[in-house]
Image (cartoon, helix red, strand yellow):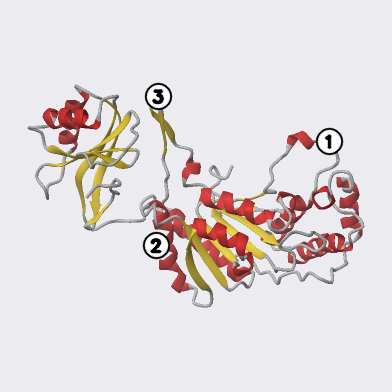
Amino acid sequence: LRKLFETYGNIRPVRELPGVPTPYSGRGVDLIVVRENVEDLYAGIEHMQTPGVAQCLKLISKKGCEKIVRLGFEVARAEGRKRVACATKSNIMKMTEGMLKRTFEEIAPEYPDIESWHVIIDNAAHQLVKKPEQFDIIITTNMNGDIISDLSSALVGGLGFAPSANLGNEVAIFEAVHGSAPKYAGKNVINPTAVILTSVMMLRFLGEFEAASAIENSVMYTLEEGTYRPRDVVGDAAGAPTTVYTDAIIKNLGKKPSSYQVRDYQAIKLPQVSTAATTVIPKSRHVVGVDLFVESSDSPIDIGKSVEILTADSAVTLKSIANRGTKVYPPTGTITDCTDQFALRLMARNAGTDLSDAQIMDAVQRVAARHKWSHIEKLQEFDGALGFTKAQGED
C-alpha cells in the first residue's frame, strides 16, 4: 500500500509516557523518526546472480530524497521543533546514502529557524541509547528508519506504545508500528495504546486538533492514574484487559494529566516536488566502461588472463576484477575468500571516447564465449564526476 499510493514518508513519534517506567524515565525522550518509505532496499529488487550469490539493488532517487527531507523539516515546523538530524551511512555508500546527505545539506538552509546536522547511522543508534534526549527529528532512509524507529520505541515502553503515519501528497495511511499480531487475536490482552495514538495522528492530519488533543490527554491521564495499566507495563498476569483499559480512556475524556503537556500542533505542509520522471539533467555524460558480472569457479588470475585474450582486439580493456567488492585481479597480495561471482571492470580502450552499445555487446559476446555472465552495468560520468564506485584496493 505504501508503494502503490506513494506514501513516501513514515512518521514515527516516541515520547516519554506517564506511568510507563523505563530505564530512560525522567530523561525527557521526545523525538520523531521521519523515514523514507518506498525506496532503498525495500524496493525489494533481488536476483540470484549465481547459485551461491544473491544481490539486492539499493535504489535511492534525488526526488525521493527531496520529498523526505522537506517533509522532515515541515513536520518540525508543524510541531514547533527546532532540531533536525539526518542519519545515513554515506561514509560507505557514498552515492545512495550520500544522495540523502547531500540533498539534506542543500535544503537545510531553506529552514534557517531549525538547527540541522548530519550523523552516521551507527552513531545515531549509539546516541539514541546513550543520550536520546538530544534528538527532535531524525530523517533517514528506509532500512535505517525501520531499525532505529523500533529502537526508539523501546526507549519509552515498546511497540505497544508506538503509533505511525504513512504520508503522501494524495493518500495518507495510519497504522500502529507493531503490525497485526494475529496470535493475540480475540484474547483481549493487547495494549491498544499504539492504535489509539495512531488515530490521534490521523485526526491531526485531518485538521481535527481539538478531538486529537482530547484523546491524547485522556490516554496520558489514564496511564498517569495507573488504575488500569496494559500488560506492556505490569506483565501478563496483572495487565488490564484491552476492553477495560479502553473503557477507562473513554471515561477519562475531558481530563488532563499533570505530568504531560500535549504539544501545540499545526497542519503539516506537505512538500510539493515535481512529478516529472526526470528531475536531474546533467550537462554532459559519457559511457566510459562497463562492469560485467560473471559466474566462474576459476581463479582470479585465470579469469583475468582469459578475459584479456578474449577482448584483445576489442573496444574495451580489462582494468580489474573484483569479488564481493574487493579487487582480486591484478593480484594485490591480500587474502580474499572468493565466491563464484566476479565483476569484470572493462574500460574503453581509447580513453576519452564513449563506448557505444554495439561495442559493449561485442565485449559481452566475447567474454560469454568462455564465461557465464549474469549482469551488466554501464559505467558513466556525469558532468565530469564518476557515476560509479571503485572496489576496495582499486586505484
SS category of the residue bearing label 3? loop
**Residue 149: quarter of image:** bottom right
Q: Residue 51 carries which label?
A: 3
* Mark 1 and mark 3: Cα distance apart in space: 44 Å
Task: Indicate which disc, 1 or 2, sits on the residue closer to the N terminus.
Answer: 2
Mark 1 to mark 2 CA distance (whole Å): 48 Å
Nearer to us of marks 3 and 2 is 3
How many numbered marks are there? Answer: 3
Please say whether residue 364 is visible from this viewpoint: no
- Residue 394 against residue 321 in the figure, above or below: below
**Residue 79 visible in the picture:** yes
Which circle marks residue 186 in the picture?
1
Q: Is 183 placed left or right of 229 in the picture?
A: left
Q: Is residue 391 left or right of residue 124?
A: left
Residue 37: image location, x then y, percent: 54, 49
Which residue lies at the image location 19% right of the left edge and 26% below the top edge?
Answer: 365
Amino acid at circle 2: Arg
- Marker disc for residue 62: none
Q: Position of residue 317 (x, y in %)?
A: 14, 38
**Of 349 and 330, which appears nearest the observer?**
330
Q: Which residue lies furthest to the left in this view?
A: 313
Instruction: Return the residue at label 2.
Output: 102
